[in-house]
Image (cartoon, rainbow, N blue to C red):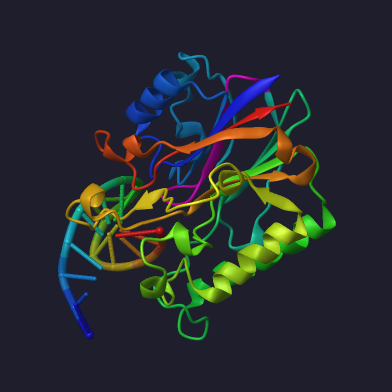
Amino acid sequence: MAFTLATWNINSVRLRSPIVQKLLQEEGPDVLCLQETKSPVDKIPLEDFAALGYGHMVARGQKGYNGVAILSRLPIEEVASEDFASLGHARHIAGRLENGTTVHNFYVPAGGDVPDREKNEKFGQKLDYLAEMRDWFTQNAPEKSILVGDLNIAPREDDVWDHKKLLKVVSHTPIEVEKLAEVQDSGNWVDVTRQDIPEGKLYSWWSYRARDWDAADKGRRLDHVWASKDISNAAHSSRVLRDARGWEKPSDHAPVFATFDL
DNA sequence: ATGGTTGATAGTCAA
């Protein structure tokens, strides 16, 4: 069975239900992982999505902030939901498809503005969150698993518009890149997006604050698709749907896709 | 060095 998966930080699933529907109709991923739904689970407009064939969902939510959901046209069963760093935030959910594939959907803390845990509690929480992800995947070695989400870190030089200018900017600091690498190593995860697109600048997020996001193109690759080693050779056709950043009332993130022959 | 925009929600906080 081949299935296509997409991950998208939607920045309010209720406000942006119209463009979620547009994505489902035009691109037809089998599984869509959303982050920053900013909604209690019972207020996610699932009926809008069910009408398009996406009647299955596992989700965690809270009022106003955070929130993760996996929409699927295939049956999916919840298998985990961890509160890493004990923040009391809805930032992780994992589901399993009937073919045995596990999908982890993460919204890693953004970390605030100052990359120093002494001066900025949020930065420390981000590093702690990553350390607990690492420890969890050390204890729970992933098999036949996919990890996606807004990891809020752009690890490579060509994942940002200017490596040198961003070295002290939260999302691209060396300590964050190191912590993310530890998570990746702990689960033997393969970066599927960069397996498929090994060369060149690649972004999934552009700030709302730019006058012209497209022309300035000051992007970062914050959204990721990883696969456990045992299924990494089944992955292909990765892409970022940059067009979606220019849709009506857009999210500041674009969806990232991958297809798996499993 | 600073401000730029957006969303949830009702004065700010978070991104």
Residue A85 visible (yes or no): no
* Start-end of magenta stretch: A62-75
Residue A33, picture quadrant: top right
Q: Residue at 44%, 52% (x, y): give it.
A: A65
* Quadrant holding the C terminus of chain A: top right
**Residue B1 shown left or right of residue A76 in the figure:** left
Looking at the picture, how far across and down is residue A233, in whole percent?
A: 72, 37
Residue visible at 48% across and 21% down in the picture: A28
Taking the image as shown, residue A45 lies to the left or right of residue A117, namely left
Q: Tell me what residue is drawn at x 46 percent, y 78 percent.
A: A115
Name the side, left or right, on which A71 lies relative to A168.
right
Considering depth in this image, is B5 or A206 the residue closer to the camera?
Answer: A206
Total numbered labels placed on residues in the image: 0
Taking the spot 24% from the left edge, 51% from the top edge, the residue there is A213
Q: Quadrant of residue A4?
A: top right
- Position in image of residue A5 (x %, y %): 57, 31
Which quarter of the picture shows residue A193?
top right
User: Residue A61's x, y, as percent?
Assistant: 53, 43
Q: Can you give x and y, in whole percent of width and height, for residue A151 in the image? A: 54, 55
- Residue A219 is inside the magenta segment: no
Residue A21 drawn above or below residue A242: above
